[in-house]
Image (spheres, rainbow, N blue to C red):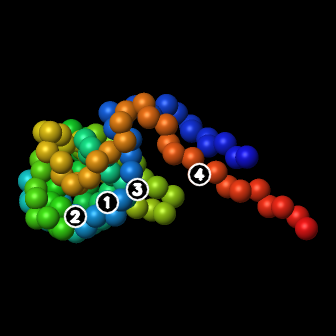
Amino acid sequence: MSLLHFRCKERRRTLRVALTVPLTVHGKLDSGEKFCAQTNSQSVNRHGALFPLEEIVLVGQTLILVNDHTAQSMECRVVSIHRARDGKTYIGVEFLSPETNFWHMQFPIPGSKPLRRIVPTKVSA
């Protein structure tokens, strides 16, 4: 039996779900110039998302996220920026009005435990 290893306690209001959704990100560069970038979400939760972005943004900056499947847009704030080993920069954002179901899905209730699949043991002949 294997155990899951978590490096830190989950601090999100809802659990993250690995979901790839095509996104369009609108924002402003430091110089004031507007940008529009295509990307895909890496993981999402009811209150935000994590996605790679080539444009340089700052923590606290406001962006407009567009779900390309539904054409719905949502204003969000950059809450984290981290550079991964693959060289990409990943941006974590939170929605400014999380009441809207931007991802059109139900998320696990906070504090719920993940479902575990019971793997049958092999019987040797």
Q: Amino acid at mark 4?
A: Arg
Q: Which residue occupies 88% across, 64% down?
A: 124
* Sequence-first disc among 4 and 2: 2
Residue highlighted by disc 4? 117
Q: Quadrant of residue 47?
A: top left
Crowd around label 3: few <14 · some 14–19 · many ≥20 (10 Å): few
Tag 1 residue = 41
Amino acid, disc 2: Leu
> Circle 3 sits on which residue?
18
In whole angstroms, how far apart are the C-alphas of marks 2 and 1? 7 Å
Tag 1: amino acid? Ser
User: Residues under labels 4 and 3: Cα distance?
Assistant: 18 Å
Check residue 58 in the rendering and tell me which mark sits there, or answer none.
none
Residue occupying the point 49% across, 31% down: 9
How packed is label 1: few (under 14 Cα within 10 Å), some, or many (20 or more)?
Answer: many
Disc 2 crowd rating (10 Å Cα; few below 14, some 14-19, many 20+) is some
Determine if residue 84 is in view: yes
Label 1, secondary structure: give it. Answer: loop
First in sequence, mark 3 or 2: give its number.
3
> Is residue 56 rendered to the left or right of residue 34?
right
Seen at 67% across and 55% down, the residue is: 119
The image shows residue 16 at horizontal and vertical percentages of 38, 46
**What's the mark number on residue 23?**
2
Q: Which of pointers 4 and 3 lies earlier in the amino acid sequence?
A: 3
Mark 1 or 3, which is nearer the eye?
3
The foreground one among 83 and 67 is 67
**Mark 1 or 3, nearer chain start:** 3
Closer to the camera, 60 or 107? 107
Q: Secondary structure at mark 3?
A: strand
Nearest-to-viewer mark from 4 and 2: 4
Task: Measure how far apart labels 1 and 3 are at the Cα level.
Answer: 8 Å
